[in-house]
Amino acid sequence: MQLIVNITVLAAIYALLACGYVLIYRVSRVMNMAHGELAMLGAYLLYSTASLFTAHPVTAIAAAVVMSLVVGVLVYVLLMRKMTGEMVLAAILTTIAIGILLRGLVVLIWSAAQQHPLQKLHFSNPSIELIAGARISTCAAVLVLMTILVYGALFAFLRFGSWGIRMRAAGQNPLLAAQRGVNLNAIYALAWGLSTLTGSIAGMLIALDSGLDQTMVVIGLKAFAPALVGGLDSLVGALVGAVIVAAAEVLAIHYIDPLLSDVVPFLVLIAMLIVRPWGLFGTREELDRV
Amino acid sequence: MSRQPRASGYFRTGYGADLALLGTRLERTSLIVFAIALVAFPFIASPFQLDLASQVFLAAIGALSLMLLTGYAGQISLGHAGLIAAGAFTVGILFQELKAPFWITLPAAAVVGALLGVIFGLPSLRLRGLYLAVSTLALHFVVVYIGGEYESRRGFSTGIVIDPPKIGSFTIGDGRSWYFILLAAAALTLLICLNLLRARTGRAWRAIRAHETVAEALGIGIAGYKLLAFVISSAITAVAGALFAYYRGFVSVEAFSLFLTIQYLAMVIIGGMGSLLGALLGAAFVTLFPYLIEGALLALPGAQGYAGILFAVNYSAFGFVMIAFLIFEPLGLVGIWQRVQNYFLLWPFRHRSAAGAPR
Amino acid sequence: MTEALLAIEKLEVTYKRAITAVQGITLTVAPGQIVALLGTNGAGKTTTLRAVSGFLGIDDARVTEGSIAFKGERIENALPHENTRRGIVLVPERDKVFPNLSVAENLTAPVPHGTGAAERRRRETLVSEFFPRLGELKSRIGGLLSGGERQMLALASALVCRPELLLVDELSLGLAPVVVEDLLRRLTEIRRELGITILIVEQSATVALQIADYGYVMENGRIVLDGTAERLRNHPDIQEFYLGRKGGGESGERRSYRDVKQYRRSRRWYG
């Protein structure tokens, strides 16, 4: 039973991080390799606001959330916008370089020591007892809840919201969207902002649950596998991929070898690339677009 | 392999002349001068500078092989560190298990590299661009995992120590010997790359990079050439990894992180895609960059306190420079070099005449 | 004399700084007109439309000389969505709808000119009045529509943007003649009811001259002939090279070009 709880929590983490990759890719065909670093930045921002507003945890959280949205928009407007139209490798490398820059800056600003925003917010994180003796920490439970909320909101927005429809349109045919009055730069900035926002929420909750240091970027990189397994331009795919990869990882750790935890997502990824490169729910045509 | 026409009107009148590496007297003499400078260097340089130069040569081998794969054949690979690790671990494993000498381990590393090249290259037959990059990334993690498993299973949790290579009774251990060996290795690699690119293989690769469908329509067997690019590039990279293992005397899985791959990709991009000179310039730049940063940092007041954050400053500065090159100078150092050249060649004109649009 | 809605003066468009696709054309479109731009492949017609709608950047093309003025305002090198706001809307030749969105979503995507409910009602009336078929297909996915339905959807989504100048690129491409007739009828209706000016680019001169008031013929990037539709229809060279008839008048027989010995003689209109 504990296994199922672990799988659920890990799947929630992966899902919340994976939807960030999908958002940006679906709208602008860019693979944001800096997603893990941006999520980590969001968590560090929470640490700062928590230190600032120790008596008002709600303000601290709200401030951090807004700041991460702004950071995402700024990264697009100042850096990624210049890379539109360049070749794939250059765009990927730019995001990688942004990630490296952020990693360095984070250590410079906040030091390499592990931080505990939980303490700063004066929250506690007791473990809740569920059925059959399985336990889950409060923060992890909140994380699962947030994942469901975020996905619900994203689905509703993309399906029914006018700007959600425009985002999907811009992803399918940017030229036509521009011709119908859609400001592509605004759409891309929105995608980057939302992606960083969801990633930061994941980062913050992980930090609250188990402390914060630079190793969080590894989770960001691992979350890339579920995004691809499900299909880089499908939110449903990200959810399903997250469950699959999380299950594979938890079961492998439990039954085979704990050291496998960093490799399993990539093994699943390789398997999917061999069998069905565009993922479970991705659109097939993506392959031929270089 | 056509080069820009020179201002002095150097015209090539035959295929042999077109393919020649050193056509003009200027090129021949400058090569001789450069060679003399390189050979004389160890006798006037400090051990630290010698070490730096050796590192640059070592990096150049890896950069050249990556340039072949990505800059010329157009196959994106994020698995470079995995291949270097494979070469290094081949040496480490063969040494620890069989006490094998270097004239077995180096070729073995090349073979391992070639085999891995086939594996890394198989996805390229079905995937392109982003998906190819991702598949090579995934393979990198697998290779590194296997290396880590070996380390922990055989009890080398801090890494494998390797004796320096011996030729007869002569141990290659001091800086000067290593300088010449690595210089020779880098020069040999450069020659191999140049010859590959002058031949049919190079032309096929360029065609594949430019437009794959058209290349196939012209009868170029793209599957074979893509795999060939991976195999050759990986073999060279693995040998670089083997040399790296001998040079450091030490193999440990932590040295082969994703950051190493990114450094090599930076060498290719900052140097300038599609140019061997770019690979060399990029290798020099990226290898020397951390030392530059360290020197700059130490020159600032209050130097002692910076030791702890040196790594972070390195990272930030590296990321920053990479972004700057990607956004502002996508043609890299070679692009800058060409612009400087053009300025002097075309003066007093500012531009070449526009490609003849009939009026 | 009415102020021209669109005035192009000596326009030159160059691709990749090497190929001059449009070599100095001058044309005007008066408000309320339907103007046709005729010519074979590679004449530069689509390039002209792209230049007007602001799409040149994608193919590394640029306006290198001349000017494009819309209602007196210079618009060369403006961004596509800016031009849409001004009222210039393009119905492209390919990729004219969003393939993975439903018909209803295709019609919601264009950025609105008004607020919520009123705008939505306006779009509904627009669609039901001119394209009732689309009303039945609201939830069909764009990529699954037939050719004619897709063209209708493309026109409808263009109309939703409240154009003053509608640019239509190759309306008849790949469509059965019956369908094309139907679309042409709707276009004339649209012009009549909404007063929209239309610039239509066509390879098929028969189609274009059916509804146009005025026409320009382009070849190799230059305008070689222009005139009212009537004059063009009766012009012997147009009849021979674009309408496939030899001999004067509409009743001339259609002969294969192979029968015309002097097919390779130079075109008369250069004189």
Image (spheres, coloured by chain):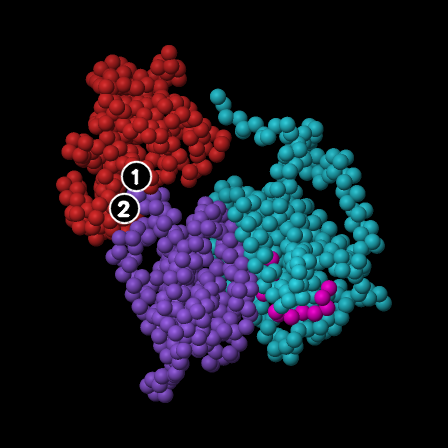
Which residue is the site of mark 1?
Answer: C84
Q: Which mark is residue C111?
A: 2
Neighbours of disc 1 within 10 Å: few (<14), some (14-19), many (20+) = many
In the foreground, B47 or B125: B47
Q: Which chain is purple?
A: A
On the image, which quarter does residue C202 sit in? top left
Q: Which residues are magenta?
A: B247-263
Where is residue B3 shown, x and y percent of the image? 64, 36
Q: Which mark is residue A129?
A: none
Please indicate, yes or no, whether residue B196 appears anywhere in the rendered image. no
Give the residue at x 20% y 35%.
C183
Where is residue B90 shown, x and y percent of the image? 66, 67
Give the residue at x 53% y 62%.
A105
Amino acid marked by disc 1: Thr
Counting residues from the N terminus, which is met first, the one under dot 1 or under dot 2?
A: 1
Where is residue C187 shown, x and y percent of the image? 20, 33
Give the residue at x 48% y 34%.
C16
Amino acid marked by disc 2: Val
